[in-house]
Amino acid sequence: MNETLYMVQLRLNPERLIRFAQDQGINRAWDEDLGYCIHAWLAALFGALAPKPFRLFDPSTTWHKDRPLKWFGYSAHDGATLREQAETFASPLALAVCDPAELSCAKRMPTAWATGRRLGFEVLTCPVSRRETEKDVFLRAADAATDADSIPSRAEVYSAWLARQWGEAATLQSTRLEGFRLVRMMRRMQPNVDSVGRPLRRLMYPQALLHGELTVADGAAFAACLARGIGRQRAFGYGMVLLRPLR
């Protein structure tokens, strides 16, 4: 039996979000996509129930102190459970970033997807692979090319990478690279010490917005992919698949 999945949505107050980040010592210009800030805020708000994957919509282009930021996430827990967790255990600064009453609007996602169903999709990804270190999959493809003329395009590489991420769950009918940029990101180092003691480090990773159409090949595997998310950096705002119907 497939586990229940919910889509949750919140509007975040930008000024209070930055106040939270400042209190946590993580307000840095090199957290360009706010991925680490939102990751830390979700942990403070929901603890172990923090939704993942999630997406913060265009923080670099829509930043206005008087305009809420739009946030979506997938969660195994319903809105009432998330709200109770936040209102009971979150710190005041974390809770003030959003209105927890909006969690009552959480939407239950289908638990069964029919094989052969065609859907449109959109997903913000961090297309990297790990072999000792994380590296842009396009750069790996360029390294493997025998000459400059055999280097595939970035869109081709990302499309093939996305198909591998879906595995047996779905067949891609088309994929478009709608947006690409290099993003400065912030993460903590990983020594065996408490998170408070881990130093912050700066990274530069690719961010790719992919649109397209797919056909569900395995309904249970498809639901699992939605819940897990696509690619790496899923705890920091990447890999949440948004779906649309096709006529």
Image: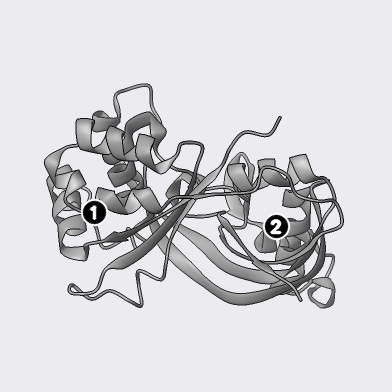
Crowding at dot 1, Cα within 10 Å, few <14 / some 14-19 / many 20+, comes out as: few
Q: Position of residue 84 (x, y in %)?
A: 29, 34
Residue at x 50%, y 59% (from the top left corner)? 205
Looking at the picture, how far across and down is residue 216, in whole percent? 81, 54
Dot 1: what SS? loop
Q: What's the mark number on residue 140? A: 2
Q: How many callouts does the rendering have?
A: 2
Which residue is tagged 1?
99
* Nearest to N terminus: mark 1 or mark 2: 1
Horizontally, residue 162 falls left or right of residue 203, namely: right
| Relative horizontal placement of residue 53, taking residue 128 as reference (left or right) | left
Whether residue 43 is visible to the viewer of this picture, yes or no, is: no
Q: Nearer the viewer, residue 223 or 125?
A: 223
Name the residue type under label 1: Asp
Q: Compared with residue 39, is residue 13 higher up or lower down, i.e. above or below?
A: below
Give the residue type that dot 2 points to.
Answer: Arg
Residue nearest the viewer, comparing 143 with 44 = 44
Q: How is the image coloured?
A: one colour
Quadrant for the C terminus, please.
bottom right
Q: Are marks 1 and 2 in contact (CB under 8 Å)?
A: no
